[in-house]
């Protein structure tokens, strides 16, 4: 009996099964909250984010706006930082977004955002204001 004829089939089955598992494990969790407005992690602020373009592009630089208020909706003068990454891939954004200024409504304009691939991204807004430091985390799917 020639074993060389028979071993490639189990190896191929293992490769296909592993590929299927890898694909399934890269799917975003089904219960993610995709809202672009919610309380910060410790409830110190209400934070809203919005892309400057719709749909959000992959591979192109673009901007976002960030609005920060108290939990009851009063405007907050705060320093914000914007960051993100792909939890399932273990990497961050390929750029370093920066606050470019504020718009007429007082929202921070974040420039230099680029997503290098489609999939599930987490965006984090770090807020340093009178109530203290806090972070709001947002999920987006591209």
Image (cartoon, rainbow, N blue to C red):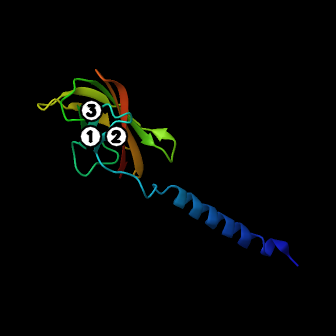
* Count of picture labels: 3
Residue 3 in which image quadrant = bottom right
Q: Position of residue 52 (x, y in %)?
A: 21, 42
Identify the residue under disc 3: 110
Q: Quick one: SS at disc 3?
A: strand
Q: In which quarter of the image is the N terminus?
A: bottom right
Q: Which residue lies furthest to the bottom in this view?
A: 1
Q: Nearer the viewer, mark 2 or mark 1?
A: 1
Q: Residue furthest right?
A: 1
Q: How far, Cα to Cα, is label 2 from label 1? A: 15 Å
Q: Image point 11% across, 31% down: which residue? A: 104
On residue 114, which mark appears?
Answer: 2
Q: Which of marks 3 and 2 is in front?
A: 3
Q: How crowded is mark 1: few (under 14 residues within 10 Å), some or many (20 or more)?
A: many
> Between 35 and 55, which is closer to the camera in this rendering?
35
Identify the residue under disc 1: 49
Q: Where is residue 80 in the image (x, y as percent from the top left)?
A: 30, 27
Q: Is residue 78 above or below residue 55?
A: above
Residue 103 in which image quadrant = top left
Q: Residue furthest front?
A: 72
> Between 62 and 127, which is closer to the camera in this rendering?
127
Q: Image point 62% across, 67% down: which residue? A: 16
Q: Position of residue 13 (x, y in %)?
A: 67, 70
């Amino acid at each position: 009996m020639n074993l060389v004829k028979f071993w490639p089939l189990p190896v191929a089955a293992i490769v296909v099964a592993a590929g299927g598992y890898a694909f399934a494990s890269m799917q975003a969790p089904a219960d993610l909250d995709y809202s672009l407005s919610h309380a910060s992690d410790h409830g110190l602020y209400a934070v809203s984010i919005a892309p400057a373009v719709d749909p959000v592009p992959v591979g192109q630089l673009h901007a976002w706006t960030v609005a920060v208020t108290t939990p009851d909706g009063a405007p907050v003068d705060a320093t914000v930082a914007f960051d993100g990454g792909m939890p399932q891939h273990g990497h961050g954004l390929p750029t370093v977004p920066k606050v470019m200024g504020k718009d007429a409504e007082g929202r921070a304009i974040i420039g230099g955002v680029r997503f290098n691939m489609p999939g599930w991204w987490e965006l984090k807004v770090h807020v340093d204001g009178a109530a203290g430091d806090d972070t709001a985390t947002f999920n987006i799917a591209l």
